[in-house]
Image (cartoon, rainbow, N blue to C red):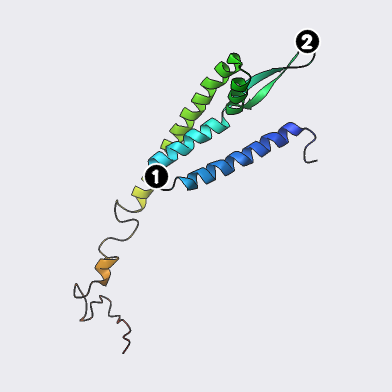
Amino acid sequence: MLFSDSLPQLWLSYGVLSLIVLVTGYLAVRWIPLLPRLILVGVVAGGLWAVAPFSLPLLQQGEAYSGLAPAIVVMAVGVIQHDGGQVAGAMPLLLVGAALGAALGLGAWRLLRRRHDDTGSGSGHGRKKGRPTGAAARAPGKRGDAHGKADGRREPVVN
């Protein structure tokens, strides 16, 4: 056994599975622009990783087991058991976690945008100014020798 207690194993399993959910979810929504994608993944991560207290009655009269669990699990169990107290306790923590995740997603977007702006001034994407790229570099007759090459290179010709 990896641990003497099963709770650390349970939290480790939950953490690994939630990371798998986040990575596959991020890859599934690649068609969404970066800002909404990061905010969406942040909301899901905040919902998955928010923690809420819970209490479950034991078989002995008047005794209960209390602990911490993911807020989404506490809320789901509260809804299934029709326990409004657990739902009322877990819902605000779940919403706070989702809001914090959205804020972290927005922060990550700002950091990525700032890093992108620092490396290349806007549309240059990190390339040096003044040197044509793409179709502008391959267009014949723009500059250079008779073959359209600015640095004297010649394309191979197949006869």
Q: What residue is disc 2 on?
A: 61
- The residue located at (42%, 41%) in the rendering is 37
- The residue located at (62%, 38%) in the rendering is 15
**SS assignment at label 2:** loop
Quarter of the picture holding the N terminus: top right
Whole-percent x, y for residue 41 in the image = 48, 38
Decide which of tag 1 and tag 2 comes sooner along the chain.
Answer: 1
**SS assignment at label 1:** loop
Residue 71's image quarter? top right
Residue 20's image quarter? top right
Is disc 2 surrounded by few (<14), some (14 to 19) or many (20+) residues within 10 Å? few
Q: How far apart are the two marked residues, 1 and 2, measured between alpha carbons? A: 53 Å
Whole-percent x, y for residue 2 in the image = 77, 41
Q: What residue is disc 1 on?
A: 32
* Near-viewer residue (25 or 81): 81
- The residue located at (52%, 32%) in the rendering is 46
Q: Is residue 5 left or right of residue 131?
A: right
Q: Amino acid at mark 1?
A: Ile
Q: Is residue 152 left or right of residue 23?
A: left
Whole-percent x, y for residue 67 in the image = 68, 22
Say if residue 110 shows up in the picture: no
Whole-percent x, y for residue 152 in the image = 27, 80
Q: Amino acid at mark 2?
A: Gln
Above or below, 150 relative to 32:
below
Above or below, 139 relative to 23:
below
* Near-viewer residue (21 or 97): 21
Say if residue 95 shows up in the picture: yes
